[in-house]
Image: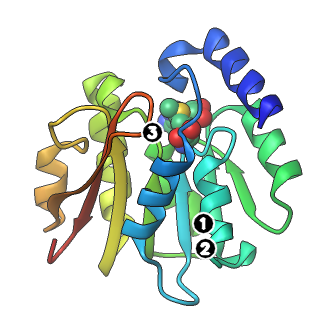
Amino acid sequence: MKNSGLLFWRRYLHRPLGVGAVAPSGASLAKAMVQTLAPGAGDVIVEIGPGTGPFTRALLASGVAPAKLILVEFDPEFVRHLRRKFPGVTVLQGDAQELPRLLKEQGHGKVPRILSGLPLRSMPEAVRTGISRAMATSLSDDGMLVQFSYFLAPPLAEAEVAACGLKARRARAVMANIPPAFVWRYSRNA
Ligand SMILES: C[S@@+](CC[C@H](N)C(=O)[O-])C[C@H]1O[C@@H](n2cnc3c(N)ncnc32)[C@H](O)[C@@H]1O
């Protein structure tokens, strides 16, 4: 955890806008994200922007099999760290805007569960729109996407969400996180 914190800080100094936070998410937010996602046994789960892996750790601790987990991370140092720390988990280095292609290369189409730790509301609008579209179009019909945000407004771009027939619901508030965060869920039946 100490090493993860240092690595996170170092990568924040290197690429502040892309990392988008000064510290990894806390255990209470990680637990709330995983409880909201509530994956079924055997569901393929895609985690976007894992950083040093607080949500990955919580997913595995909840019983998710490493072979069912695909991480998509932009930063090569985080990717190396994740591969060392989570053997058996598929760690892809890439841009979330390319999610449909990245999944296709792994032999997957649409997936039932996506969990995102991206700082969407702090990203340029065109990037937020591109990532929202890529995640929404990668979700299967009965799928669910979970995303946290430090802001009250819904994190994904609304037009992209509506175009895929998804509805947004603010599922939880985690006041114990620093800063406090909201957990949003997107699905076709909210
Ligand atoms: C705010 S950090 C959150 C890390 C972790 N999920 C947590 O909650 O502590 C955002 C992470 O998303 C990654 N990231 C940013 N833009 C990305 C993109 N376009 N595609 C994939 N990962 C990205 C960053 O490198 C960083 O690891």
Above or below residue 147? Residue 5 is: above
Asked if the residue at tag 3 contacts the one at tag 1, i.e. Cβ–Cβ closer than 8 Å, the answer is no
Camera-nearest residue between 103 and 53: 53
Mark 3 within 8 Å of ligand 1, using the beta carbon: yes
Nearest to N terminus: mark 1 or mark 3: 1
Which quadrant of the figure contains the C terminus?
A: bottom left
Look at mark 1 in the image and give the residue it sits on: 59
| Residue 106 visible here | no
Q: Please, which residue is most extreme toward the bottom here?
A: 41
Label placed on residue 118: 3
Residue at 41 percent across and 32 percent down: it is 119
Q: Where is residue 137 in the image (x, y as percent from the top left)?
A: 32, 63
**Kind of residue indicated by mark 2:** Ser
Camera-nearest residue between 41 and 96: 41
Look at mark 2 in the image and give the residue it sits on: 62
Residue at 50 percent across and 23 percent down: it is 21
Q: Distance between the residues labelled 2 and 1?
A: 5 Å
**Kind of residue indicated by mark 3:** Leu
| Residue 84 visible here | yes
Question: Left or right of 114: which side holds 68?
Answer: right
**Quadrant of the rendered image holding ligand 1:** top right
Q: How far apart are marks 3 and 2 (CA)?
A: 21 Å
Q: Position of residue 180 (x, y in %)?
A: 34, 34
Which secondary structure lies at badge 3?
loop
Mark 1 within 8 Å of ligand 1, using the beta carbon: no
Above or below residue 97? Residue 21 is: above
Q: Look at discs 3 and 2 and give the one toward the viewer.
A: 2
